[in-house]
């Protein structure tokens, strides 16, 4: 059997996809799967990184955006 390769997108450094589902316990919206990671395992490895980025974003909005 021969499969035709089709590139749908090329991710650049810092880009990702599928993270919303695993971070927010939402259903996946993509139909492509090449890597499956359980949420607990993902968060144990990357959770601190995302918490730091969230804190940076919150600090930015608190000081730079009027609400």
Image (cartoon, rainbow, N blue to C red):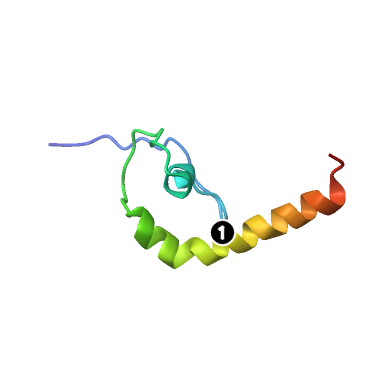
**Circle 1 Cα neighbour tier, 10 Å, few/some/many (<14 / 14–19 / ≥20):** few
Q: Is residue 51 left or right of residue 57?
A: left
Rendered residue at 68%/59% (across/down): 55
Q: Quadrant of residue 32?
A: top left
Instruction: Quarter of the image for the C terminus: give it.
Output: top right
Q: Measured from the top left, where is residue 52 in percent x and y?
A: 62, 63
Residue 45 point in image, percent of width and height: 43, 66
Q: Is residue 39 above or below residue 32?
A: below
Task: State the residue in front, 1 or 39.
Answer: 39
How many marks the image carries: the answer is: 1
Residue 17 drawn at (x, y percent): 47, 44
Judged left or right of residue 19, residue 59 is right
Location of residue 44 (image quadrant): bottom left
Q: Residue at x 63, y 59 (%)?
A: 53
Residue located at (47% from left, 49% from top): 23
| Image coords of residue 39 (percent x, y) | 37, 54
Quarter the N terminus occupies? top left
- Tell me: residue 11, above or below residue 7: below
User: Could you tell whether 61 is left or right of 52 in the image?
Assistant: right
Could you say which is closer to the camera, residue 3 or residue 30? 30
Residue sitting farthest toward the left? 1
Q: Name the residue that disc number 1 marks.
A: 50
x 44%, y 43%: residue: 18
- The secondary structure type at the circle numbered 1 is helix
């Amino acid at each position: 059997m021969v499969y035709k390769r089709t590139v749908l997108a090329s991710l650049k450094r810092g880009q990702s996809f599928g993270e919303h589902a695993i971070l927010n316990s939402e259903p996946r919206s993509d139909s492509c799967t090449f890597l499956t990671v359980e949420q607990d395992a993902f968060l144990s490895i990357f959770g601190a990184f995302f918490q730091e980025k969230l804190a940076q974003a919150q600090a930015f909005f608190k000081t730079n955006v009027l609400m």
